[in-house]
Image (tube, helix red, strand yellow):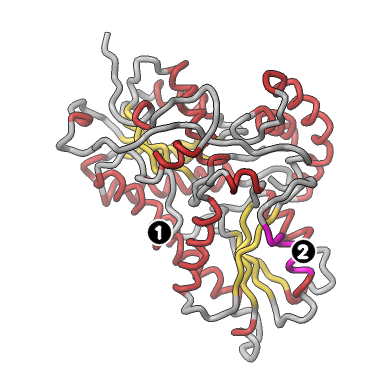
Amino acid sequence: MKGIISSGHRISSFAVRGLGLRLFSSSSTALKRQHKATAVVFMNMGGPSTVPEVYDFLYKLFADGDLIDLGVGRLQRLAAKFISYRRTPKIEKYYQEIGGGSPILKWSNYQAQETCKILDQTNPETAPHKPYVAFRYAHPYTEETLQKLLDDGITRAIAFSQYPQFSYSTSGSSINELWRQTQKLDPKRTIEWTSIDRWPDHPGLVKAFASNIRSKLQEFPESIRDKVKILFSAHSLPMDVVNNGDAYPAEVAATSYAVMKELNFSNPYRVVWQSQVGPKPWLGAQTAKLVERIEADSEGVVLVPIAFTSDHIETLHEIDLELIGESKFKDKLKRAESLNGNETFIKGLAEIVGDHLKSGELHSKQLPFDCELGVGRDVFKHPSEMFGDHYKPE
């Protein structure tokens, strides 16, 4: 996350191990229980909605060993308090400059609500569909949302990762936390969970990005429009995570390629990586450095936040205020709109959930391999331990 992760920190991994899937369909034993509703839980990193929430957000982020391994073992929480205290004033200033807080909760609530409205029409057999949001580092925290599901009497829920491209440090951390909180709050496993853990090339996602890029290209004169460079910018990862076999770089590339195919490869493009901090090797080329290299001689550049499903500090501050706002060639630089309330995108989200419900899958076929490659602690050892019917009656 931009400006938050300081030097020397290692993003660690999602550590569920195992193979195989179990069916979750109308013909499987998993559905012999009667469910009154289907909860669709949008899971994401989150962001502080107000400036006073920044410290707690930073502390939870730095205390998460799945995301950032500080290399201090049991002292991680103590180190997280120190780092968060030091960095809070700087990060508070960033949030003040983008309006006093992150808009990610607003957009997540909207996207989840609209998705469920569509699902009630397209998938009546699993209706009503109830929208929820669970953030890893900001309100509503995973445990808060899980308790809300229990209070609402939910017995069937979908953990819908809002990271289209899977990484151990994002989707994996959210699923791990769901597992830990389930052990505490729902030990009898009254809620039957399934997972949508990645969707990098779904047509709804691809078409929404392509439409936003077309709209931004229209702002350039027609005579140079096809010469404008498109840079797909995603949050970077340390190379030790990449070298561990993380799926994220390949899936970000898959999304970018699919979008360019939708655009008939109309413009030159590259995948670039933002938010690198510290001296460690990170995945590159870095967005800011590449823009600096090409902006003077380019007809124009469109930046596309390809791994983000709504606006937050990485788009509103790092790209808009810093990269573009401080450039000598800001007239040549534009950012494609974030997905936010894009109707095509939201229809795509509903299709993803609807297809998942009809597929009978508990999780993707990739997830067991992700788990096998991962390293972690205090987590379940096989995806089937979390997903599927584990109800323990009295």
Q: Quadrant of the C terminus?
A: top left
Please tell me which residue lies in front, 174 or 289. Answer: 289
Residue 187 position, x and y percent, is 39, 15
Identify the image quadrant of the N terminus: top right
Does the magenta run of residues contain 30?
no
Residue 204, image x, y percentages = 41, 61
Q: Dot 1: what SS? A: loop
Q: Quadrant of residue 305?
A: bottom right
Q: Main secondary structure of the magenta part?
A: helix
Note whether 275 is above or below 4 in the view shown.
below
The amino acid type found where label 2 is placed reads Lys
Front-most of residues 155 and 52: 155
Q: Is residue 85 left or right of residue 347?
A: right
List x then y, in percent, for residue 389. Answer: 28, 26
Q: Earlier in the sequence, mark 2 or mark 1?
A: 1
Residue 202: mark:
1
In the displayed structure image, the side of residue 5 where residue 370 appears, left or right: left
The magenta stretch is 284-292
Which residue matches tag 2? 289
Q: Dot 1, crowdedness within 10 Å: few (<14), some or many (≥20)?
A: some
- The nearer-to-camera label among 2 and 1 is 2
Q: Which of 182/115 is in front?
A: 182
The image quadrant that residue 325 belongs to is bottom right
Residue furthest toward the bottom?
223
From the viewer's perspective, is residue 199 above or below residue 12?
Answer: below
| Residue at screen point 57% across, 33% down | 136
Q: Secondary structure at mark 2?
A: helix
Residue drawn where x is 35% and y is 20% of the image: 189
